[in-house]
Amino acid sequence: MAESCAWILVLGAVLLCNLVKTLLPSVSSLLSKVLQKDADQETQMRLDIQSMKQELSTISMMDEFARYARLERKINKMTDKLKTHVKSRTGQLAKIKWMVSIVFYILQAVLMISLIWKYYADPVTVLPSKWIAPLERLVAFPSGVAGGVGITCWLVVCNKVVAVMLQAFS
């Protein structure tokens, strides 16, 4: 694997996955805006409620009690309708974010498993055995080459290094 520079492919895949992970909230918000067209309706309902409240403030409760009570009931009904609408939209938004995250993590797992499957027999690099003496077998997994760094260890190291670097930049 060291001769073919496939370790760069692994590092690039890890970097891409971590970058996409940081952009996941933005992607899910954009997707939810595309899928949910009810925001205009909510805005219109809010404007209607405000205009009715302004009209209510101009009516004298003592002089025109029936009209005042009717308008107040209408405002309450519209407010309740808006609350249920917002609650359902919020539930849909959470569901969309959850689905986007699940799809991303499934794709990431498939990518990592395919990389391990493709490069399981070849070490990323071979180091002197003394350098990694107590953990030699663990570091060499699954290649089993003495002093070698296996793809799984390389993936773990790349994930940690990329995560630390991205955290430093954000």
Image (tube, rainbow, N blue to C red):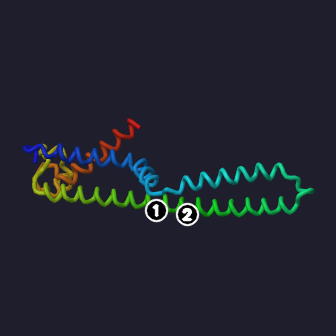
Looking at the image, residue 166 lies above or below residue 68:
above
Looking at the image, residue 66 lies above or below residue 22:
below
- Please give left or right for residue 2 compared with residue 101 in the image: left
Viewer-closest of 148 and 18? 18
Q: Are marks 2 and 1 in contact (CB under 8 Å)?
A: no
- Coordinates of residue 132 in the picture (x, y in percent): 19, 47
- Please give left or right for residue 69 compared with residue 40 in the image: right
Label 1 SS = helix
Q: Residues within 10 Å of mark 1 (few under 14, many from 20)?
A: some
Under mark 2, the amino acid is: Ser
Viewer-closest of 69 and 103? 69
Under mark 1, the amino acid is: Lys
- Coordinates of residue 117 in the picture (x, y in percent): 16, 59
Q: Mark 1 points at which residue?
A: 95
- Coordinates of residue 34 in the picture (x, y in percent): 43, 53
Marks 2 and 1, the one that precedes in the sequence: 2
Label 2 SS = helix
Q: Which residue is drawn at 76% across and 48% down?
A: 54
Quadrant of residue 120 within the rendered picture: bottom left
- Please give left or right for residue 159 compared with residue 45 in the image: left
Q: Residue at x 31, y 46 (%)?
A: 160
Q: Residue at x 54, y 53 (%)?
A: 39
- Coordinates of residue 169 in the picture (x, y in percent): 38, 35
Viewer-closest of 90 and 141? 90
Q: Residues within 10 Å of mark 2 (few under 14, many from 20)?
A: few
Looking at the image, residue 52 lies above or below residue 2:
below
Q: Name the residue under label 2.
A: 88
